[in-house]
Image (cartoon, rainbow, N blue to C red):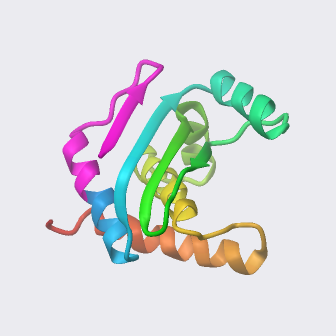
């Protein structure tokens, strides 16, 4: 089950399409979704989570809380729409593309992918691009 929670004035278009995409993304890596909670918020909300839970005092686009058990994906994914908008401008990509990248980035973390080294980050970026392309595949 995938749940979408909106703490700001934002809503995904066609949530079912995102459900199918995230489900397919997990299947391609041998995982099944137990429960994913996407929480869309603003910078201030995510900064507070970053400070309170991770002792980090900086803005970020996503924080993922991992409750995975074996090959069953579960987690809470907090996404700052403010950061997604700013990143899209900075990287000269569309908001939709950047949002998909961030959404799948969190899921990839839940599947064990990391971005803690240069090599791991390169692998993560390649996986993000691979999975974003699945969004356009007829499902």
Q: Nearer the viewer, residue 122 or 70?
A: 70
**Residue at (61% x, 37% y) in the render:** 83
Q: Position of residue 12 (x, y in %)?
A: 32, 35
Picture quarter with the C terminus: bottom left
Residue 135 placement, left or right of 71: left
Magenta stretch holds residue 63 = no
Residue 39 placement, left or right of 138: right
Residue 97 placement, left or right of 112: left
Residue 26 placement, left or right of 117: left
From which residue to which does the magenta span run?
1-20
Q: Nearer the viewer, residue 113 or 128?
A: 113
Residue at the outermost front position: 69
Q: Position of residue 94 (x, y in %)?
A: 44, 49
Among the 4 quarters of the image, the one containing residue 114: bottom right
Q: Is residue 22 above or below residue 10?
A: below
**Residue at (57% x, 70% y) in the render:** 125
**Residue at (39% x, 25% y) in the render:** 10
Q: Position of residue 35 (x, y in %)?
A: 38, 47
**Residue at (79% x, 40% y) in the render:** 54
Q: Position of residue 80 (x, y in %)?
A: 57, 34
Q: Nearer the viewer, residue 39 or 83?
A: 39
Q: Is residue 33 above or below residue 54?
A: below
């Amino acid at each position: 089950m995938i749940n979408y929670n909106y703490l700001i004035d934002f809503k995904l278009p066609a949530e079912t399409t995102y459900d199918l995409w995230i489900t397919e993304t997990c299947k391609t890596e041998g995982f099944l979704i137990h429960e994913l909670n996407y929480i869309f918020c603003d910078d201030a909300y995510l900064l507070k989570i970053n400070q309170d839970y991770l002792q980090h005092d900086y803005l970020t686009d996503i924080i993922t809380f991992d409750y995975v058990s074996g090959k069953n994906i579960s987690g809470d994914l907090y996404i700052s729409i403010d950061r997604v908008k700013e990143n899209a401008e900075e990287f000269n990509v569309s908001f939709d593309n950047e949002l998909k990248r961030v959404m799948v980035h969190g899921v990839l973390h839940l599947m064990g992918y990391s971005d803690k080294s240069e090599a791991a980050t390169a692998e993560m970026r390649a996986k993000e691009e691979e999975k974003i392309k699945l969004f356009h595949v007829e499902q």
